[in-house]
Image (tube, rainbow, N blue to C red):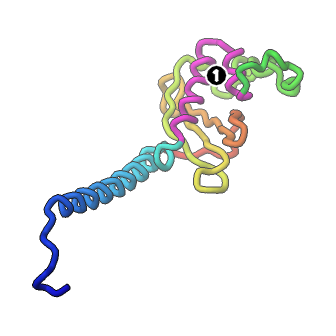
Amino acid sequence: MTLLNAPAYDEQKANLNRNLLLGAVSLVVLLIVLTLAGFITGHGWLFSNLPVEHRVNEFLTDIEQQKFSEAYGIYVSDKNWQSTPDKYKSYPLDRFTDDWTRFSPVGPIHSHHVDKSVTDGSGVFGTTVIVGSSLNGNPDKRIFIPYQRSDGTLTYPAPHIFSY
């Protein structure tokens, strides 16, 4: 085939190729923006920590409403913990309730706001997520609650805190 018998220009195929290229570039740019936005706003790469933040929010809401049985279920990551109480006798509900009421280092919790989360541990998404929350409308009164990715449990106190 020579230049003189080149195939005819196919406008439909050219438009399809252009649209596919623009779509691929747009997808890559969107992925980069979402990745950086999640990290900059403090919700993890690609907002991967949002489910953890939601779980901590549910936990703190239950503590506020004095639903300690439900909060304990979130804390130990077992909604049906009452069917196997022997499994949790090393940290029973009574002690949990005392720890989050009478012996709480932050005092009684009347309101909260989940502010930011930080990935901790090894790997891209880490083994632990530490969630920072402001309490009782005071931005200086904060609590940091670690979430273990391996089993979904919460722990306290955090191995370290972060500033924001």
Q: Residue 122 sits in which quadrant? A: bottom right
Residue 158: x and y, percent? 68, 40
Mark 1, residue position? 107
Query: Main SS type for the magenta part?
Result: helix
Residue name at image x 76 percent, y 22 percent: 96
In the image: residue 113, left or right of residue 156:
left
Residue drawn at 63 percent across, 51 percent down:
126
Start and end of the magenta stretch? 49-77
**Residue 132 belongs to the span the image colors magenta:** no
- Looking at the rendered structure, the number of numbered marks drawn on it comes to 1
Amino acid at dot 1: Gly
Q: Is residue 47 above or below residue 106?
A: below
Where residue 17 sits in the image (x, y, percent)?
24, 62
Which corner quadrant of the image does residue 65 belong to?
top right
Classed neighbour count for the residue bearing mark 1: other residues with Cα under 10 Å, few (<14), some (14–19), many (≥20)? few
Name the foreground residue: 28 vs 66: 28
Residue 56 included in the magenta stretch of the image: yes
